[in-house]
């Protein structure tokens, strides 16, 4: 066999690693900002682009796609070259991937604060950026599969199985969930509506966790943990079982985000059982990671890298235990819409994702810069401060979640809600929010130590941009299965069938859940009195979307006495058929708004109340943590775009009469004048062409349609 | 004892996979831990039972659960002893003190105080009447069209009686509320 010499590209590793560090710092700082805003509404500064509703998507996107995204690319570009004994397939594709991804992040950082959003969690980016994401993602996949094709090793290692699953699944998820119809350059409507949009969104949202925050992290773990520990992987058989079980089962679990909501029972059951079946395949990864450390535990004491990995993998085990637990309907009835979910994802995000990335970079940086880590002591300090940060972040939120859920559900002996005023249940947990800020600050402090340490390490060495390596060329071999070769060993040396099998594994659950929801009518029983929004209400809804109201307000009343007593009749699937996108939300920082407009309903408020509340929430409710929205009163509603919006809705199947786009503006003016006149009667002088009028009209429409019929009867 | 030796002793049951070497990473041929596989199989069996119970054999839906919960709650609720047709004005100090507390904590002052959202309750002008029966009814059923919340789901009839009495006995005529000026008829 001819020994070939080649060079690993470490420059691309440094580029992605540097971006990980930079965007990670930005992401945690934005996180700290919004945590502060939740406790102190003055921190919204009355500026549109600094309000919680716009910054929260910036935080989640920055952490997921910018911090963890660049982190997994760092891991993939470093480990694949070495596991496959080749330089990456294309330097150009690597650079295109890198700069493309960073441009997307910059575009997100500009457009999200400006309110350009599709308002679906972790899929907020508007359509032009979505297209860029798809192109850059394909460049990444092309480069990755190309590298696998030109490898010098016979078999593909488990880390790369996980990278392959990541690439194909994210491609499918991202494309399907982000399908939207553009109205203008920065505005589009999801092609799905209501419950269908919700199901597609959480099929995506949950699997963004699965295939962006989990599978590539497991790939990272399978390379860097045995490398850093210098120990063999505990069980090859376990790798096979948990890999295939994980990717096959994960894709089904999304509906657990919609339990007890207006989603058909069969789909909810799928969400429950597949989440429960996921527990052991997830733990397979943790067990294989921790048992790989057998015989190396004495080194964990001294090595910051191993410490980060141990806590990271343990956090993975904790959050994957908690996931199935929260997917049980009886637990979810308490946890959903509370901070429990927030605490849960931060165990995953700060512990699993964050600590695995810290460990990787502390290990990697000295190697590619041919030097020693600047300070092992500082890295250890980072570890302890970071761990304390996670504890101080998560424990108060668990406390807050349970406290608030119990308050929402408590009844007096007379049969009334014990805390009918929603505000009381927020005020009660504010001390926990102060503690959360302490936890977040600790985590950020650790992060700053990390930045200093790795920068100083880089400065003390010199990048080995092209690292020499050698390996024998790969000899041609029969595609047929050899005698004695296990089927899995066989497929490990043939990447095309492997990729196809992985695709099959993830597409089965996707099709079985989504196709019936879109095609079978009985899944969304129609309600004849539900009609499309008036153009003014539609414009108001777009303002609701733009301001990210869904980040704090749900629009989904579950069939519980505690919710129907507080908010009114429970939500029905047929009520949301014109909601492109759906706006059910996932956290109630404020009350549910599904029946906000029902006159004589549980939470109806007058036009004047809404006006005053938007202008200065604390005047209406001194303890309110809601930001003020003064610009809705000073800014004019964009009328010019309304005909285009109507046409887009018609294209999506919303039954406005033919030619209605031309009449819409007149209807907008008539309805707006009515609301302005009513405000005038209440001593509020505001022009009828202001955004606030449109938003009020939308809020007053919410949840009212099902009562129109009963009124007629 | 060196780490490597300790390690070899601890894992003498596990064999290295001969041809598994990826950039120096080796793999052992340990079986998956039995407890892990047992729980995994158990979770699959549980899932089959779950789906059969709820989705094939017609176990209770979430709406069945809701109806049961509501029926139980109504059975357990105490019944009120009077309504708006039979309500009387309370003037004893303890009832009025209770009424004052309700006024401050149930959200009345938020709209009827300095925010000027609702009408002034401290002047002589009344939009929906000023007998105890009128005020009781206004609080209990609200005036949704104008933004007054119905409080029947938040207060007992007794509590509504107390706060209505407080408004009529203590607040009326003090001119200490908001600054909206007269609304409604003078009484």
Image (spheres, rainbow, N blue to C red):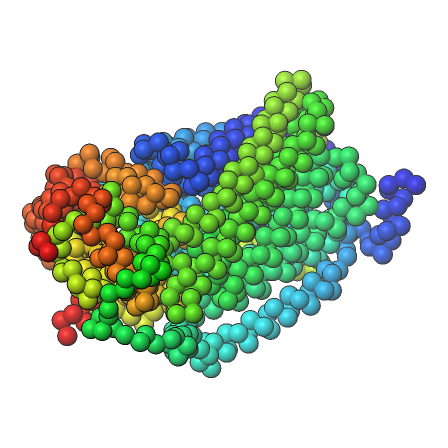
Q: Nearer the viewer, residue A348 or B101?
A: B101
Q: Quadrant of residue A40?
A: top left
Q: Is residue A118 left or right of residue A87?
A: left
Image coordinates of residue A398 in percent, x first then y, are 54, 51
Q: Is residue A6 left or right of residue A349?
A: right
Q: Is residue A295 left or right of residue A570?
A: right
Vertical arrangement, residue A462 with respect to residue A666, above or below:
above
The quadrant of the image that shows the C terminus of chain A is: bottom left
Residue at the image point whose x is 18% and y is 60% from the top: B143
Point out residue A407 in the picture as x, y percentages from the top left corner. 45, 58
Identify the residue at image location x=60%, y=38%: A389
Q: Quadrant of the N terminus of chain A?
A: top right
Q: In the image, what residue occupies the spot 59% across and 52% down?
A: A319
Residue A579: percent from left, percent from top: 27, 56
Q: Please say whether residue A287 is visible from this viewpoint.
A: yes
Residue that extends furthest to the right in the rendered view of this protein = B1
Q: Residue furthest bottom?
A: B57
Figure quadrant of residue A56: top left
């Amino acid at each position: 066999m001819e020994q070939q010499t080649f060079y690993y590209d470490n420059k691309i590793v440094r580029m992605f690693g540097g971006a990980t560090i930079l965007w990670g710092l930005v992401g945690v700082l934005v996180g700290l900002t919004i945590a502060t805003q939740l406790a102190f509404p003055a921190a919204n500064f009355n500026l549109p682009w600094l309000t919680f509703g716009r910054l929260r998507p910036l935080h989640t996107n920055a952490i997921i796609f910018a911090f963890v995204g660049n982190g997994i690319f760092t891991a993939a570009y470093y480990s694949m070259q070495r596991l496959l004994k080749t330089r990456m397939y294309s330097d150009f594709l690597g650079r295109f991937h890198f700069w493309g991804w960073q441009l997307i992040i910059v575009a997100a950082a500009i457009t999200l604060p400006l309110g350009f959003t599709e308002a679906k969690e972790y899929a907020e980016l508007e359509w032009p950026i979505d297209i860029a994401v798809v192109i850059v993602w394909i460049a990444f996949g092309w480069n990755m599969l190309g590298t696998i094709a030109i490898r010098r090793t016979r078999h593909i290692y488990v880390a790369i199985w996980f990278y392959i699953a990541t690439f194909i699944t994210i491609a499918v998820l991202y494309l399907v969930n982000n399908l939207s119809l553009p109205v203008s350059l920065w505005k589009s409507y999801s092609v799905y509506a209501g419950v269908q949009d919700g199901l597609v969104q959480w099929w995506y949202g949950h699997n963004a966790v699965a295939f962006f925050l989990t599978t590539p992290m497991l790939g990272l773990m399978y390379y860097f943990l045995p490398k850093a520990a210098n120990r063999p992987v505990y069980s090859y058989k376990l790798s096979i079982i948990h890999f295939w079980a994980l990717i096959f089962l994960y894709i089904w679990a999304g509906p657990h985000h919609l339990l007890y909501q207006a989603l058909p029972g069969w789909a909810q059951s799928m969400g429950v059982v597949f989440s429960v079946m996921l527990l052991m395949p997830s733990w397979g990864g943790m067990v294989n990671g921790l048992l790989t450390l057998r015989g190396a535990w004495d080194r964990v004491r001294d090595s910051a890298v191993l410490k980060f990995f141990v806590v990271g993998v343990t956090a993975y085990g904790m959050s994957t235990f908690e996931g199935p637990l929260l997917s049980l309907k009886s637990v979810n009835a308490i946890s959903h819409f509370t901070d429990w979910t927030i605490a849960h994802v931060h165990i995953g995000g700060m512990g699993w994702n964050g600590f695995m990335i810290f460990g990787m970079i502390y290990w990697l940086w000295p190697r590619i810069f041919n030097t020693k880590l600047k300070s092992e002591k500082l890295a250890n300090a980072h570890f302890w401060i970071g761990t304390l940060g996670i504890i101080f972040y998560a424990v108060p939120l668990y406390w807050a979640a349970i406290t608030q859920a119990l308050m929402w559900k408590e009844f007096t002996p007379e049969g009334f809600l014990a805390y009918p005023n929603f505000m009381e249940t927020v005020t009660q947990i504010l001390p926990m929010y102060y503690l959360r800020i302490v936890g977040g600050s600790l985590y950020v402090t650790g992060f700053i130590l990390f930045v200093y340490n790795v920068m100083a390490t880089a400065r003390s060495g010199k990048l080995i941009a092209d690292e020499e390596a050698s390996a024998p060329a790969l000899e041609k071999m029969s595609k047929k299965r050899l005698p004695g070769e296990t089927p899995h060993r066989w497929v490990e040396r043939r990447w095309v069938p492997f990729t196809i099998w992985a695709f099959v594994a993830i597409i089965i659950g996707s099709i079985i859940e989504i196709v019936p929801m879109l095609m079978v009518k009985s899944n969304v029983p129609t309600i004849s009195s539900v009609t499309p929004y008036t153009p003014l209400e539609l414009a108001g809804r777009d303002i609701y979307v733009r301001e990210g109201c869904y980040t704090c307000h749900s629009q989904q009343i579950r069939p519980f006495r505690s919710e129907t007593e507080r908010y009114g009749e429970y939500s029905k699937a047929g009520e949301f058929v014109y909601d492109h996108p759906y706006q059910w939300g996932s956290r109630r920082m404020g009350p549910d708004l599904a029946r906000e407009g029902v006159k004589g309903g549980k939470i109806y408020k007058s036009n004047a109340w809404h006006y005053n509340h938007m202008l200065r929430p604390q005047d209406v409710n001194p303890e309110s943590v809601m930001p003020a929205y003064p610009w809705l009163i000073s800014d004019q509603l964009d009328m010019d775009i309304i005909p285009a919006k109507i046409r887009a809705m018609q294209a999506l199947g919303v039954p406005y009469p033919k030619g209605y786009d031309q009449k819409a503006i007149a209807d907008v003016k008539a309805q707006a004048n009515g609301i302005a006149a009513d405000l005038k009667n209440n001593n509020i002088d505001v022009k009828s062409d202001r955004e606030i009028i449109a938003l009020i009209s939308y809020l007053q429409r919410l949840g009212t349609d099902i009562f129109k019929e009963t009124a007629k009867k | 004892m060196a780490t490597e030796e300790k390690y070899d002793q601890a894992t003498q049951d596990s064999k290295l996979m001969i041809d598994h070497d990826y950039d120096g990473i080796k793999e052992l041929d340990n079986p998956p831990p039995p407890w892990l596989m047992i729980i995994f199989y158990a979770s699959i069996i549980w899932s089959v039972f779950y789906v059969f119970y709820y989705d094939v054999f017609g176990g209770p839906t979430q709406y069945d659960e809701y109806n049961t919960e509501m029926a139980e709650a109504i059975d357990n609720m105490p019944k009120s002893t009077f309504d708006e047709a039979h309500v009387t004005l309370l003037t004893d100090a303890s009832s009025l003190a209770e009424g004052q507390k309700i006024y401050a904590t149930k959200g009345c002052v938020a709209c009827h105080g300095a925010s000027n959202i609702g009408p002034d309750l401290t002047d002589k002008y009344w939009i929906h009447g000023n007998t105890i029966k009128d005020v009781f009814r206004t609080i209990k059923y609200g005036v949704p069209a104008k933004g007054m919340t119905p409080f029947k789901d938040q207060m007992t009839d007794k509590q509504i009686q107390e706060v209505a009495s407080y408004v009529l006995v203590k607040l009326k005529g003090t001119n200490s509320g908001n600054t909206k000026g007269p609304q409604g008829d003078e009484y």
